[in-house]
Image (cartoon, helix red, strand yellow):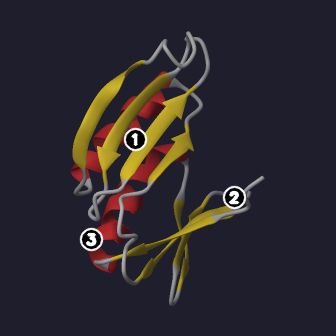
Amino acid sequence: MLDHVEVEVSDIGASRLFYASALEPLGYALKVEGKSLGFGDARAKDFWIKPGVPANRPLHYAFNCSSRRQVELSHAAAIRGGGRTDRAPALLPHIHPHYYAGFVFDPDGNSVEFVCHSQE
């Protein structure tokens, strides 16, 4: 099981704004400021960004949401924070009947997903 993920970003300021906005509806906030920026909630600091050279191919990662509404709020907040829409929140029944997800591109072009697996 993963403990945390750290992603290199080309513009730490733009990425800080994007992730602070996108993760706020999930109860995440910037918890550690230093060479790397750590985001988390009261339980863990499990998502980190640091200045550097982004992967030569876009990454894909998903944040688990407790409700479909949280997917929608995070997707909208990510757009307000400088992201670009990839796919609006919708059911993806080809994965499983209750898979509800929205996708955005972060400032480096990574595919960021917000997903809820619960039936509404």
Q: Residue furthest front?
A: 56
Q: Quadrant of the C terminus?
A: top right
Q: Image quarter for residue 109?
A: bottom left
Q: Position of residue 106 (x, y in %)?
A: 31, 57
Q: Amino acid at mark 2?
A: Ala
Report if the CB atoms under discs 1 and 2 are less than 8 Å apart. Answer: no
Separation of residues labelled 1 and 2 (CA atoms): 18 Å
Separation of residues labelled 3 and 2 (CA atoms): 24 Å
Q: Mark 2 = which residue?
A: 42
Q: Residues within 10 Å of mark 2 (few under 14, many from 20)?
A: few
Which residue occupies 59% across, 12% down?
A: 119
Per the image, label 2 sits on a secondary structure element best described as: loop
Q: Amino acid at mark 3?
A: Ala
Per the image, label 3 sits on a secondary structure element best described as: helix
Q: Mark 3 = which residue?
A: 14
The correct choice, above or below, for 88 with respect to 98 in the image is: below
Query: Between tags 1 and 2, which lies in front?
Result: 1
- Does label 1 or label 2 sit earlier along the sequence? 2
